Amino acid sequence: MRILVIDDEIHIRKTTTMTLDALGHECEQAENSAEALDLLKKSSFDAAFLDLRLGSESGIELIPKLLLLEPKLNVIVFTAYSSMETAIDAMRRGAVDYIAKPFTPEQIRQSLTRIENNRRLENRVVELESMLATTETLADFATEEPLVQKTFETATKAAASSATILLLGESGTGKSMLARALHRNSPRRENAFVTVACPSLSKELLESELFGHVRGAFTGAVGETWGKVKAAEGGTLFLDEIGELPLEIQPKLLRLLQEREYERVGDSKPRKADVRVIAATNRRLEDLVKEGKFREDLYYRLNVITIELPPLRQRPMDIVSLAKQNLKQFTRQSGRNRIEFTPAALDAIRRYPWPGNLRELRNVIERAVILASGDKIDVNDFPDNLCGPQASTAAIGNRVSLEELEREHILRIIEIASSMEEAAQILGIDPATLYRKRKRYAEIAESAHSSSSPASTS
């Protein structure tokens, strides 16, 4: 933490500063209230150790002034045994703790530990509120697809490590949600999960957001800030859309990954970082490396454990169950009674290729819950494109091949059966044959989607 020591006695300031330095914190000193307020105007601090008697000045009167400039400042007061009542008064005015003089280094450490624990709890509350506010659901990680199960098994094993993880997959496949799940299942779960959206800011602002900056580092930098790397200390730093990271910042990220070290913008002092990095992208980083847009050494440093999330069209056995889970969630959020899909609505959900993947599915279900007039969701409650020509499938009597009819029948049996083994028994075929057919259907669907999509220019 960055800590301000305010005491009129120089030996107390020096002793406290030496103790804090030994504990790994960064310190500034102030002899009186004017110096303290001036430092707070120029920079930011996490905590302050304040003597209640600053010569002829009252430390108690200084507390509200400090908190006015830095509302989240944790003020710990120094007091003699004879002034405990004064210490209690100081806490009523906003101090968080007090230490009796003479004090020991262990008392300093314990006081800061309490502050760190409180900050950790506050970060956890913020994270939980963010999770409650999002429409994403862990049901997206439930699957009947064997290949997808292997992907999630890999993720479960990777979560327990401190290794850097690279998440790949199309937009909307759940990469950010999986990143949160990895954090929640890691030894770092009690600390912060911090997200940086790489395409969202200019190079200068993104660098400052990541690493922080000192006062005067650039135009508009009127104070000091600690970046997202510092905010994620002891926790997880999630770099979303890492393929959009500017080349100028990539060497600094490489240093963070290799040496666990970074510097704030405008500051030459190296700082250590204890963060676990998870990165995500919907682009092929190998192609960006060949094009000179992404550093090869950074790519290999990120690519320690790679998890590729499949598009929804490759999860035919999961689509209906995912739709029902989302329906249950949005029905509960809307405060309505139970709502169900009509058979026609389920058919439309099953047939549609879902180019927007899980995100599109959630959006469609949320819209349908809002628009449904009764306790049934029908195709009329879906967007037009969901029931358009691209969503239509084979039906008996139409000009379709036997192969298309077989595919439609097999997928419907898989949907109603409780397991692949039961589906194979109903169909009268070997389970291995059924697995091969289902895999082939997924490959055909993916090929059809790729051929219908506009060619990539990157």
Image: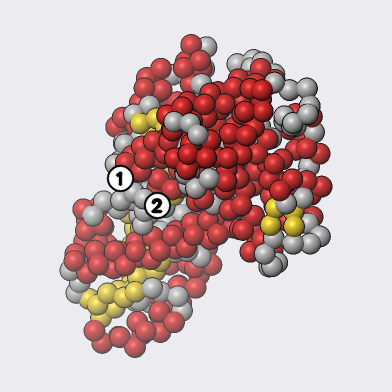
Q: On screen, 329 above or below 177? A: below
Rendered-image quadrant of the C terminus = top right
Where's residue 286, x and y in %?
46, 17
Give SS at disc 2.
helix
**Label 2 sits on what residue type?**
Arg
Foreground of the two, 263 or 434: 434
Dot 1 or dot 2: first in sequence order is 1
Display colour scheme = secondary structure
Residue pictured at 44% horizontal, 58% vertical = 123
x 25%, y 81%: residue? 80
Q: Is residue 206 visible?
A: no
The residue closer to the viewer here, 281 or 437, is: 437
In this view, 328 is above or below 162: below
- Is 175 on the left or on the right of 276, as rendered? right
Q: Which residue does the numbered mark 2 point to in the structure image?
A: 184
The residue singled out by tag 1 in the image is: 160
Q: Residue furthest front?
A: 428
Label 2 Cα neighbours within 10 Å, binned few <14 / some 14-19 / many ≥20: some
Q: What x and y, as percent, mark residue 186?
A: 34, 49
For image coordinates 27% across by 74% down, the residue present is 99
Is residue 27 visible in the rendered image? The answer is yes
Q: CA distance from mark 1 to mark 2?
A: 10 Å
Q: Return the residue nearer the eye: 244 or 451.
A: 451
Q: Work out which residue is located at the far top of the displayed protein and give it.
A: 290
Quick check: 452 above or below 330?
A: above
Q: Which quarter of the image is occupied by the N terminus? A: bottom left
Query: What amino acid is at disc 1?
Result: Ala
Instruction: Please tell me how many numbered marks the rendered image carries.
Output: 2
Q: Secondary structure beneath disc 1?
A: loop
